[in-house]
Image: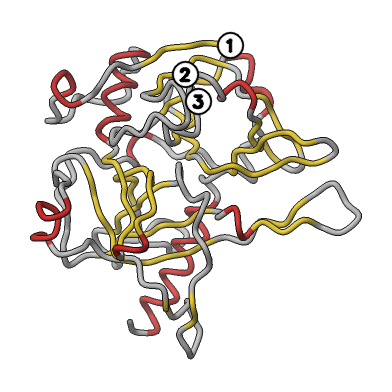
Amino acid sequence: MNKNIAELSRLISNSILTHTPIINLPQPPSAKPVGCGIYLKTDSARYLISAGHLLNVDDWKKFIAPAGGDKMIWLNGVLATTYNKNNDNLDIDFSVLRFSSRMNKHFTDEQWIFISNDQILVNHKIDYNGYYFVAGYPISGVKKKVGEAVFNPIPLKLITQSILQKRYAKLGYSEEQFILVEYRRKLQAFGAKQAQITKEIQGISGSGLWYVPDFNDKDENGIPKYFLVGIMTENHKDKGFLLALKIDFVTEIIIKAFADKAFDHSSFNLTSNIPNIQIVQEL
């Protein structure tokens, strides 16, 4: 990787982290991180996208998420999820929470930046030679401050590529539904001179998989444009890859369950590919 790509990758990853809140279980006087999510805002609503095993029917009302500064909020709204319990063991693993309208006042839109619908890329064809980004907060990287009711999250910033196309069928995954990205235990961090053993990545579920079509196509801040193409759901580091569910599942459910007109239907066949979706609310 040349120096220019390495620096641009650092900028991309840092920007992605502003959309990637840590979901927490309250444990007064502090809280316990349990996973990640992605903040999305359309013209009609704010959403939290995550993994279904994390925001499942049984557990989602127990959790809080950051709204800005040191403020945390309960997850109030309407949830669409594929999981009833966190151990349901389904391949189609995702959830979408539409925040109730009264929650909007809690977000400052400064520390946490909600992505817009045009930053989501549906009908994405896997680029076997391109770059994908994973950025989030592994549970193992969250360090408690001694004597204080706060913790310091240490992010994982990973630039990677899809595994070889022929491996999808061998591993039993459809390229229409999943993206499998390489995960090597020994990586060279952005700007580092030597490769290091990567940290344990438990807790990265619910964060996004992001794609950069062209490093020369930059926004007004000089950051290459990146797009959300999947949700990280499972760690198969023993087999050398991380698993992401394509974002089309989410956009189709936003259209179907929430009647949000921000998205057009993808080419995805919702009826045949998505299991029963549970709709629950806490307003």
Q: How many marks?
A: 3
| Cα–Cα gap, marks 2 and 3 | 12 Å
Amino acid carrying mark 2 in the image = Leu
Q: Which mark is residue 59?
A: none
Q: Is residue 233 left or right of residue 131?
A: right
Against 204, residue 248 (above or below) is: above
At x 41%, y 71%, the residue is 8
Residue 170: name its quadrant. Answer: bottom left
| Cα–Cα gap, marks 2 and 1 | 8 Å
Residue 52: name its quadrant. Answer: top left
Label 2: few (<14), some (14–19) or many (≥20) C-alpha neighbours in 10 Å: many
The x and y percentages for residue 82 are 36, 24
Amino acid carrying mark 1 in the image = Glu
Q: Nearer the viewer, residue 64 or 166?
A: 166
Residue 215: name its quadrant. Answer: bottom left
Secondary structure of the residue carrying numbered label 1: strand
Q: Are marks 2 and 1 in contact (CB under 8 Å)?
A: yes
| Cα–Cα gap, marks 3 and 1 | 15 Å
Q: Is residue 203 left or right of residue 92?
A: right
Label 3: few (<14), some (14–19) or many (≥20) C-alpha neighbours in 10 Å: many
Amino acid carrying mark 3 in the image = Arg
Against 277, residue 198 (above or below) is: below
Residue on which the image places disc 2:
79
Q: Is residue 270 left or right of residue 151?
A: left
The x and y percentages for residue 112 are 59, 43
Q: Which mark is residue 282?
A: 1
Residue on which the image places disc 3:
46
Q: Are marks 3 and 1 in contact (CB under 8 Å)?
A: no
